[in-house]
């Protein structure tokens, strides 16, 4: 009886997890979220250049925390490629935020 209950619970959890992923795929990424996500991924990549396994785990965690998938991120970049002016404006914001992070790091080191 306990085994049957356990199996039902496991199937329920897996089903809910799958349904959650389907809804996550439908979520539309905003420019603001893309910038935040890109900046976080860039910072993590810089800090983990020599440890690709750790980098992958941290990237996955960032995607999960922001409720987006790598596929959504890639699709968003593809959509930006269709609109160079918008992509340029977003890239300017990414550079600005990365520069602010870099300046903050330098000021705390002094």
Image (spheres, grey):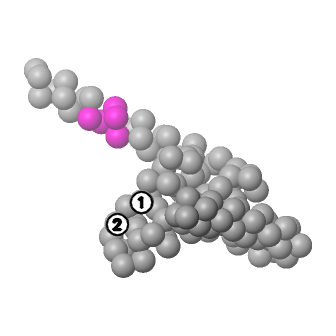
Circle 2/circle 1 CB separation < 8 Å: yes
Residue 50 x %, y %: 36, 79
Measuring from the top left, give residue 7's x and y in whole percent: 20, 32
Task: State the extent of the magenta-drawn residues as a range.
Answer: 10-14
Q: Nearer the viewer, residue 63 or 100?
A: 100
Q: Determine whether the residue tagged by mark 2 lies in a helix, strand or loop.
A: helix
Q: Report whether residue 39 is seen.
A: no
Quick one: which residue is furthest to the top in this view? 1
**Is 13 colored magenta in this rendering?**
yes
**3D distance between C-alphas at marks 2 and 1:** 6 Å
Going by the picture, which residue comes out furthest to the front? 110
Quadrant in which the C terminus appears: bottom right
Residue 24 in the image: above or below residue 35: above
Residue at image position (50%, 46%) is 65
Q: Which residue is identified by label 1?
A: 58
Q: Which mark is residue 47?
A: none
Q: Position of residue 72 (x, y in %)?
A: 61, 60
Position of 85 relative to 105 (above/below): below
Give the residue at x 65% y 56%.
Answer: 36
**Residue under circle 2?**
54
Q: Quadrant of residue 107?
A: bottom right
The residue at the point 34 percent across, 32 percent down is 12
């Amino acid at each position: 009886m306990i085994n049957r209950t356990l199996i039902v619970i496991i199937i329920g959890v897996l089903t809910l997890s799958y349904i959650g992923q389907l809804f996550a795929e439908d979520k539309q990424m905003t420019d603001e979220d893309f910038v935040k996500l890109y900046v976080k991924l860039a910072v993590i990549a810089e800090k983990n250049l020599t440890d690709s396994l750790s980098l992958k785990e941290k990237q996955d965690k960032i995607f999960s925390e922001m409720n987006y998938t790598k596929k959504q991120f890639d699709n968003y970049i593809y959509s930006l490629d269709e609109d160079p002016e918008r992509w340029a404006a977003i890239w300017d914001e990414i550079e600005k935020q990365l520069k602010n992070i870099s300046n903050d790091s330098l000021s705390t080191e002094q």
